[in-house]
Amino acid sequence: MAIQAPEGTVDLLPDGARHWDHFRRTAFDIFSRYGYSPIETPVFEQTELFVRGIGEATDVVSKEMFTAISGGNLGKLLNGEKLKGKSRLSLRPEGTAGVVRAVVQHDLVPQGGAPAKLMYAGPMFRAERPQKGRLRQFHQVGIECLGAEAPTVDAEAIIMLMRFYERIGIPRANMRLLLNSMGCEKCRPAYREQVRDFIHAHAGELCEECNHRAEVNPLRAFDCKNPDCAAVMASAPKITDHLCPECREHYAAVKELLDAAGVTYVEDPKLVRGLDYYTRTVFEVQVVDGMGSQNAIGGGGRYDKLAQEVGGRNTPGLGFALGYERCVLALEAAGVEMSAPRGVDVFIACATDDVRPKAFELAQIVRDAGSSAELDHQSRSLKGQFKLADKLGARRVAILGPDELAEGKVKVRDMSTHEERLVDSDMMERFFGQFGGKKFGE
Ligand code: HAM
């Protein structure tokens, strides 16, 4: 049998790849209006970064990381030798840790400097059990803002995220924005103890893993997918009742800014998110219907201690990431047709074989003028060439016939209006440079 793509991965075929590119560009277009600049970090990092940044007790790190073994290290490992820290590499399960590592390494937020507002897009890798909306290689678009702790950063990012979803066509009514505050290193430890005590008091009603979580990281019990555990944890102490005055004030300010911007949200004190770096604001956007259990299309929050965790100075941060494949499912569930600009500006068709060299030359002239051009490479009949032009979504077909060429003309047909126009062949460059994919008269 022919070799297939690995489980939990998908090929983005040309239409899909074009859509992903359009999606990413749309996101970057919106995010750049808010001052975000692109950043690219490696798809693999030292495993230690994720262990320290995301947290050893999280599912993402303890169960879902793909670890990469480079070259000769496989032999060492098979011989029972231990690898040095630098040689222990993992594929990135998310983008935040790598971006924060880059910010620290390159000192992108010098002391007293302006915040670094960064955006990224690319594949992430998690060794999860694949199902609808859950892949082992998926695509995220995300942003990270480092260097400012003001609640305006949180609110601005959330508003921008919601604007993006609406811009790509997910109806607002299909989405639920969940909001919570996770407190800080001042108020969270005491709260964590209360949750631990709560888990101990309900040990018999909770799964084995939640009981184990009580010892390592009790807040993870809020994330348990077991419905019995979720029912028990619903009556656990709520973080929002235990915030210190500074965190309470910060949270209130974020909510006020969202209210003023008309962004509706649901407060969910059980929202802890699956990564350990969060402090204060956390949020998640879920699709209300038609997506099953994998209904989170994006999420994020504040991580004021992460830069320090990876060896940098105290640099507050906030960010989010959204899952491309889940957004595609959300668009499908809403019955929104996904389309990315496609098609060729002009298909150059030949009525007879002797004009093919001229067609080849004209195609080059059109491309040099900045439009896209395609022609037949398989000796098709004129009818066959029109069929191909149609399949390629050509906006225009330039028809080259011996008679027109003898007069130095090319017939150009607009494929949507069927209007035809004779263009001087030596004016093709100007014609397509000027009109590109536009309709006649536009
Ligand atoms: P996350 O919630 O783990 O957050 O992932 C963000 C989004 O990625 C999810 O809401 C979901 O849409 C998508 N996603 C996650 N796992 C999968 C999967 N296995 N298959 C398909 N889609 C998936 C983060 O990754 C954080 N780095 C967000 C962040 C940025 N927080 C602060 N800054």
Image: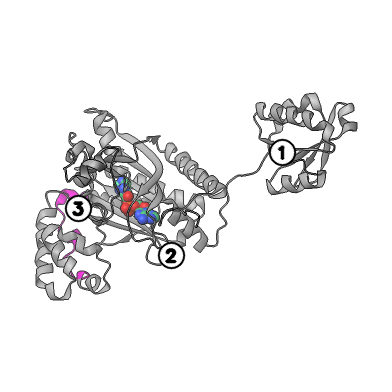
* Disc with the residue nearer the chain's start (3 vs 2): 3
Give the quarter of the image for residue 435.
Answer: top right
* Residue 234 on the magenta segment: yes
Q: Residues within 10 Å of mark 3 (few under 14, many from 20)?
A: some
Q: Is mark 3 within 8 Å of ligand 1?
A: no
Magenta stretch encompasses residue 23: no
Relative image position of residue 108 (x, y in whole percent): 28, 29
From the image, tell me which residue sits under label 2: 291
Q: Residues within 10 Å of mark 1 (few under 14, many from 20)?
A: few
Residue type of the residue flagged with mark 3: Arg
Looking at the rendered image, the disc whose residue lies closer to the viewer, 3 or 1, is: 1
Residue 123 seen in the current view: yes
Which label's residue is closer to the chain start, 3 or 1?
A: 3
Q: Position of residue 259 (x, y in %)?
A: 35, 54
Secondary structure under badge 2? loop
The residues tagged by marks 3 and 2 sit, at their Cα atoms, a distance apart of 33 Å
Q: Which residue corresponds to mark 1?
A: 377
Q: Amino acid at mark 2?
A: Met
Q: Does the CB distance between marks 3 and 1 fall below 8 Å?
A: no
| Quarter of the picture holding the C terminus | top right
Identify the amino acid type marked 1: His
Inter-mark Cα distance, 2 to 1: 44 Å
Structure colour scheme: one colour
**Residue at left offset 50%, top offset 43%:** 21
Circle 2 crowding by C-alpha within 10 Å: few under 14, some 14–19, many from 20: some
Front in this rendered view, residue 129 or 306: 129
In the rendering, which numbered label is found on residue 248? 3
> What segment is highlighted magenta in the picture?
233-249
Q: CA distance from mark 3 to mark 1?
A: 67 Å
